[in-house]
Image (spheres, rainbow, N blue to C red):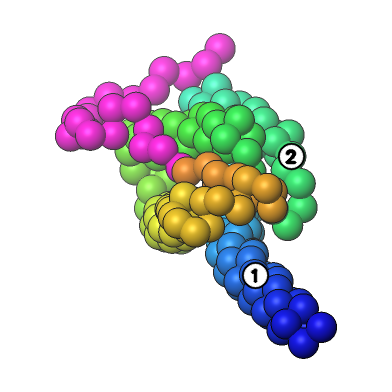
């Protein structure tokens, strides 16, 4: 009887130790996953900051005589497309959702870049305080986006590494932990961009 109780006690101790061990792994992965989700919220925040600047930018630029109106239309439409991309609140996106998000944000970023290039042909527009302020704020927004995307990728990498390391790899799948998506570099980002400013040309007036 005494031997049985000892064996039973040892088994109980092993079970408790095993539960504590798995609980520790689970809690650690939860913390890492929450960190990724929290950083995703910050990524959304900086992208939203850029989107919030656009109405004022469009209003300022549209007042310039003979400005290329199609550029403003592209920005307005691209901003609307960004707003259609929806995610589950409080969680980072799946790979497919992130790809859709990047595509929409990339179109908006390209439209903004074209607007700023076209604006180079309008000295009177560039000289206005409102435009200079908005341009500066947009540049700051782009820098913040780059920083927050980098932080997101770092946390996602740490989380993805954690669920693949021993011993977590034996429990992560069972406990429902899956890989987090990364931001990818835009195609051609490794190439040096060609920048050309032609101040002699002016966009033709639209009929």
Residue 121 appears left or right of 58? left
Q: The C terminus appears in which quarter of the rendering? A: top right
Identify the residue at image location x=63%, y=39%.
94
Identify the residue at image location x=47%, y=37%.
109
Q: The N terminus appears in which quarter of the rendering? A: bottom right
The residue nearer to you, when weighing 140 against 66, is 140
First to last magenta residue range: 183-207
Residue 93 covered by magenta stretch: no
The local secondary structure at tag 2 comes to loop
Q: Is residue 45 above or below residue 59?
A: below
- Of pointers 2 and 1, the one earlier in the residue sequence: 1
Q: Position of residue 206 (x, y in %)?
A: 52, 16
Question: Could you say which quadrant of the image residue 184 lies in?
Answer: top left
Q: For the view shown, which residue lies furthest in the front direction?
A: 1
Per the picture, the main secondary structure of the magenta-coloured stretch is loop
Q: For the view shown, which residue lies furthest in the top direction?
A: 207
Q: For the view shown, which residue lies furthest in the right direction?
A: 1
**Tag of residue 18:** 1
Q: Position of residue 118 (x, y in %)?
A: 38, 32
The residue nearer to you, when weighing 147 against 181, is 181
Residue 141 appears anywhere in the view: no
User: Which of labels 2 and 1 is toward the front?
Assistant: 1
Q: Position of residue 181 (x, y in %)?
A: 53, 42
Residue 109 appears anywhere in the view: yes
Q: Is residue 3 above or below residue 156?
A: below
Identify the residue at image location x=34%, y=43%.
123
Q: Which residue is mark 2?
A: 86
The local secondary structure at tag 1 comes to helix
């Amino acid at each position: 009887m005494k031997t049985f109780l000892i064996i039973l006690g040892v088994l109980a101790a092993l079970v408790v130790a095993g539960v504590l061990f798995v609980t520790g792994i689970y809690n650690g992965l939860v913390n890492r996953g929450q960190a990724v989700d929290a950083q995703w919220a910050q990524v959304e925040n900086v992208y939203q900051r850029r989107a919030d600047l656009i109405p004022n930018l469009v209003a300022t630029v549209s007042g310039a005589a003979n400005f290329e109106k199609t550029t403003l239309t592209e920005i307005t439409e691209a901003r609307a497309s960004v707003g259609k991309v929806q995610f589950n609140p409080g969680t980072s996106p799946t790979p497919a959702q992130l790809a859709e998000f990047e595509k929409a944000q990339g179109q908006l970023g390209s439209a903004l870049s074209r607007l700023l290039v076209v604006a180079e042909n309008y000295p009177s527009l560039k000289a206005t305080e409102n435009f200079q302020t908005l341009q500066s704020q947009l540049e700051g927004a782009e820098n913040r986006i780059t920083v927050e995307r980098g932080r997101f990728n770092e946390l996602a990498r740490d989380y993805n590494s954690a669920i693949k390391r021993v011993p977590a790899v034996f429990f992560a799948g069972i406990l429902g932990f899956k890989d987090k998506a990364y931001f990818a570099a835009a195609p051609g980002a490794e190439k040096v961009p060609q920048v050309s400013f032609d101040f002699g040309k002016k966009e033709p007036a639209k009929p």
